[in-house]
């Protein structure tokens, strides 16, 4: 599903942002990526989205080697990789329905299909009744649910969540993580970058820990484990 083979990424002379990283994530896994600022987590996400190119190494996602994907085919590749950010990135001048529908419009989904899929995904994230609301009219937790719905409406095989609880209070953070777990249980591979070690410890998933561009541990959390 996701494979990195000896991947490095250097922005300029000096210490690389990623240094000889190799890892494999199977279809249907739920994986946390943790580490201090500057550990390489954000660079990893950008490489997986093909926003950046590795300096060395190979990345394969959904049996596609990213280095062989032509520039014009990148949007098609990204349809199978949903992404959720810390700051939601919603369109302020469009309501909840239109924010989610936007992801379908850009790939030319027929209106008939859109009218079926958008309400379905909003229902899944618990926002069916808020479809006419604008971002400023709903809470931070609800805005993140809209962002998740938008990421899922095209039915990607992979969902990348970059600090999805970073702007939320504890209650909303837990609700978002429970939603991500439900999404994973439906078959979507979920990779979450986070600083929230309380959640990571409680959820007992696979945890990849990075430090200065290197994977320093990769293990499944158990009751006795500490990060």
Image: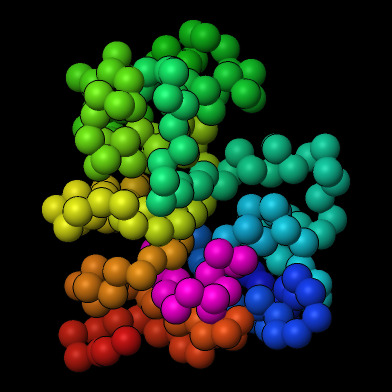
Taking 14 as reference, is 61 above or below it? above
| Image quadrant in which you'd find residue 128 | top left
* Residue at x 66%, y 76% (from the top left corner): 17
Q: Quadrant of the C terminus?
A: bottom left
Residue in the foreground of this view, choosing between 73 and 139:
139
Q: Residue furthest top?
A: 112
* Residue at x 29%, y 14% (from the top left corner): 132
| Residue 93 spot, x, y in % from top left | 44, 18
Is residue 38 covered in magenta? yes
Q: Is residue 1 visible?
A: no
Residue in the foreground of this view, choosing between 70 and 174:
174
* Residue at x 41%, y 46% (from the top left corner): 87
Taking 155 as reference, is 41 above or below it? below
Residue in the foreground of this view, choosing between 119 and 133:
133
Taking 171 as reference, is 88 above or below it? above
Residue extent of the magenta highlight: 29-44
Residue 134 is left or right of residue 203, and the answer is: right
Residue 14 is left or right of residue 113, and the answer is: right
| Residue 135 spot, x, y in % from top left | 33, 27
| Residue 187 spot, x, y in % from top left | 40, 51
Is residue 211 covered in magenta? no
Colour convention of the picture: rainbow
Q: How many marks?
A: 0
Q: Quadrant of the N terminus?
A: bottom right
Residue 67 is left or right of residue 86, and the answer is: right
| Residue 113 spot, x, y in % from top left | 49, 15
């Amino acid at each position: 599903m996701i494979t990195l083979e000896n991947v490095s990424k250097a922005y300029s002379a000096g210490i690389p942002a990623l240094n000889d990283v190799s890892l494999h994530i199977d279809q249907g896994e739920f994986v946390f990526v943790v580490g201090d600022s500057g550990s390489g987590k954000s660079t990893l996400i950008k490489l997986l989205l093909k926003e950046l190119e590795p300096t060395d190494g190979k990345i394969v996602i959904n049996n596609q080697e990213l280095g062989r994907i032509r520039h014009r085919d990148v949007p098609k590749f990204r349809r199978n990789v949903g992404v959720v950010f810390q700051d939601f990135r919603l369109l302020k001048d469009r309501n909840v329905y239109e924010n989610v529908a936007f992801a379908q419009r850009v790939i030319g989904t027929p209106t008939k299909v859109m009218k079926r899929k958008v309400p379905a995904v909003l229902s899944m994230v618990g926002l069916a009744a808020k479809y006419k609301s604008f971002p400023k009219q709903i809470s931070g937790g609800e805005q993140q649910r809209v962002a998740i719905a938008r990421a899922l409406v095209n039915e990607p095989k992979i969902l990348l969540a970059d600090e999805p609880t970073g702007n939320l209070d504890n209650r909303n953070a837990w609700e978002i993580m429970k939603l991500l777990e439900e999404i994973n249980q439906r078959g979507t591979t979920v990779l979450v970058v986070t600083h929230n070690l309380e959640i990571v410890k409680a959820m007992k998933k696979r945890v990849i820990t990075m430090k200065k561009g290197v994977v320093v541990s990769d293990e499944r959390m158990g009751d006795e484990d500490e990060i």
